[in-house]
Amino acid sequence: MASSNAIFNPSALSRMANTLAETCPVMSAARGAPLRAWTRRSADFEGLARSIAYQQLAGAAASAIWSRVSAAVTPMTAKRFLSFSEDELRALGLSRPKIRHIRSIAEAEVSGALNFKTLGAMPLDEARDVLTAIRGVGPWTADIFLMSAYGCVDIFPAGDLGLQLGYQRAAGLNERPGAKELEARALSWAPRRSVAAMVLWTYLDHERAKERRRV
């Protein structure tokens, strides 16, 4: 798996984004937005559990719930998490599906099916397969975790709605591209597809912010 600390470094990330913009009109159009460096997450049980907890929730709500969970489950390890009952975890704000999914991650680590130390050294497809074999960890969650925990520079979660909308705007398309179409278009950005994803996410956020200011 091609990984680097570059996506966590604003200067290095900006240089890679500029390189993409020099050779691709879509990247050039999207590159006008100020680019944020990716936020690093811990490459361990806590980092992946946090990713599950934050899914489909507004940032403030997710942060409040996770703060309560991490304060109670100390240290935040697989074995410690498994020691809590569903009722105790529900009282902290986690939903039943998320409890089941995080427990599946914990059980996978305890059993040895998931080893965070070796995951980052695996080929990308193999690392994805290990993660998505766990109940509740889909392709999007696996890709985001590999980007944010290990700094993988060549991942592009083409099924992400934000990436599809960002590409549609930057390319001036009438219709939003589907996952397969966008995945094919993203091939030209290898081996920096993670950087391209960040450019498109930032661009979409920037454009939406401009629209809100005009209202």
Image: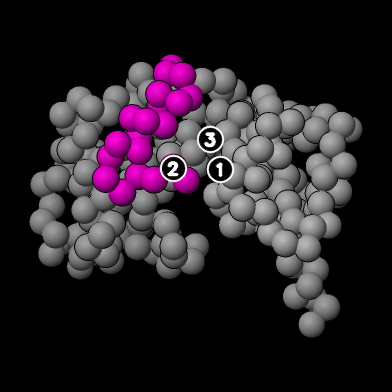
Within the magenta stretch, is there residue 3? no
Q: Is mark 1 on a helix, strand or loop?
A: loop
User: Which disc, if any, is residue 147?
Assistant: 3
Relative horizontal placement of residue 92, taking residue 62 as reference (left or right): left
The amino acid beneath tag 1 is Pro
The image shows residue 53 at horizontal and vertical percentages of: 36, 55
Check disc 1 and report the residue beneath it: 157
Q: Is mark 3 on a helix, strand or loop?
A: helix
Relative horizontal placement of residue 51, taking residue 91 as reference (left or right): right
The image shows residue 108 at horizontal and vertical percentages of: 21, 34
Q: Residue furthest bottom?
A: 215
User: Which disc, if any, is residue 139?
Assistant: 2
Look at the numbered discs 1 and 2 and tell me whether their residues touch, using CB distance below 8 Å. yes
Label 2 – label 3 distance at C-alpha: 12 Å
- Of the residues under marks 1 and 3, which one precedes in the sequence? 3
100 is higher (above) or lower (below) than 117: below
The image shows residue 153 at horizontal and vertical percentages of: 61, 28
- Of the residues under marks 2 and 3, which one precedes in the sequence? 2
Q: What is the quadrant of residue 164 in the picture?
A: bottom right
Relative horizontal placement of residue 49, taking residue 201 as reference (left or right): left
The amino acid beneath tag 2 is Pro
